[in-house]
């Protein structure tokens, strides 16, 4: 019987500690949810002009090293990605070959 009571007390104390941890975690959860809601409200209130704009190069500043492979086209682009997009949109027959 002594072992049973000792085990009971040990489990009882473990349960008390687990309940404390659960309360702490739930409190942290509600705080995080409140912070998230506040940040979402601030984001919604931010106007378009206040958002950070992406710094882009002027067209005259771009070195155009990538030329369209079609001789009749002659378009040049500043990046391979831009050239690939041009080919997909303007010359789909080149994409289907490959």
Image: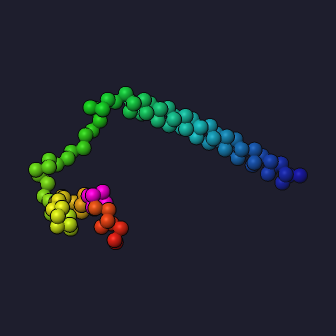
Whether 56 is among the magenta residues is no
Furthest residue toward top: 45
Span colored in magenta: 86-90
| Image coordinates for residue 73, horizontal then vertical, percent | 18, 61
87 relative to 40 in the view: left or right: left
Q: Residue at 39% x, 30% y: name it.
A: 44
Image vertical order of residue 91 relative to residue 5, above or below: below
Q: State whether residue 40 appears in this view.
A: yes
* Res. 46 image quadrant: top left
16 relative to 6 in the view: left or right: left
Q: Which of 35 and 28 is in front in this view?
A: 35
Q: Residue at 15% x, 62% y: name it.
A: 74
Furthest residue toward right: 1
Q: State whether residue 66 appears in this view.
A: no
| Image coordinates for residue 58, horizontal then vertical, percent | 14, 47
Q: Residue at 17% x, 67% y: name it.
A: 71
| Image coordinates for residue 14, horizontal then vertical, percent | 70, 47
């Amino acid at each position: 019987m002594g072992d049973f009571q000792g085990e009971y007390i040990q489990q009882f104390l473990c349960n008390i500690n687990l309940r404390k941890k659960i309360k702490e975690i739930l409190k942290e959860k509600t705080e995080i949810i409140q912070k998230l809601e506040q940040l979402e409200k601030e984001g919604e209130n931010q106007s378009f002009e206040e958002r950070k704009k992406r710094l882009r190069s002027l067209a005259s500043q771009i070195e155009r090293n990538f030329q369209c492979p079609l001789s009749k086209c002659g378009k040049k682009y500043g990046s391979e990605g831009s050239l690939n997009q041009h080919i997909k949109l303007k010359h789909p027959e080149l994409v289907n070959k490959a």
